[in-house]
Amino acid sequence: MFLVLMIAIFTFMISYLVMTLATLFSKKMIMDREKNSPYECGFDPKGSARLPFSLRFFLIAVIFLIFDVEITLLLPIVTTLNVTNMFSWLFTSLIFLFILLLGLYYEWTQTALDWS
């Protein structure tokens, strides 16, 4: 137990030393001449960096991520077929698929899947 504690303290001290040295010897400057000058294209580097994006595209991307996660939840259902009871496996799978289809129908009726 004492050996584990000593190794943990030694690891913490080494990492703290490396971080402190990296902070002290880094060549970053807050006000750099290159950063304060405008680019060749004429954009002001101190201006707003935010660009407008399509809210419709963002909504489609979020819906895609949600259904992508649901697909990863569907994949283990096939592997548990041999281990579980057939009736409980079928009932659970159908309920889960019904909930997914209900969510898809709701998104479709709210016209969240239309690009126009």
Image: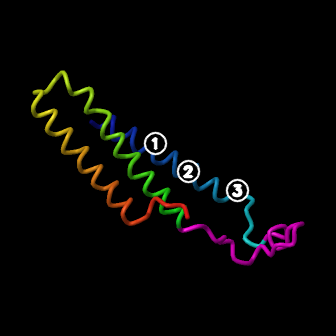
Residue situated furthest bottom in the rendering:
47
Which span is picked out in magenta?
32-55
Secondary structure state at the residue bearing disc 3: helix
| Side of 3 relative to 56 (left or right) | left
Between 46 and 55, the one lying in front of the other is: 55
* Amino acid type, label 1: Thr
Q: Residue at x 43, y 64 (%)?
A: 111
Which quadrant holds the C terminus?
Answer: bottom right
Q: Amino acid at mark 2?
A: Leu
First of labels 1, 3 by sequence position:
1
Quick check: 28 above or below 65? Answer: below
Find disc 3 in the rendering and name its residue. 25
Q: Which residue reaches farthest top?
A: 82
Q: Quadrant of residue 9?
A: top left
Amino acid type, callout 3? Phe
Q: How far, Cα to Cα, is label 2 from label 3?
A: 12 Å
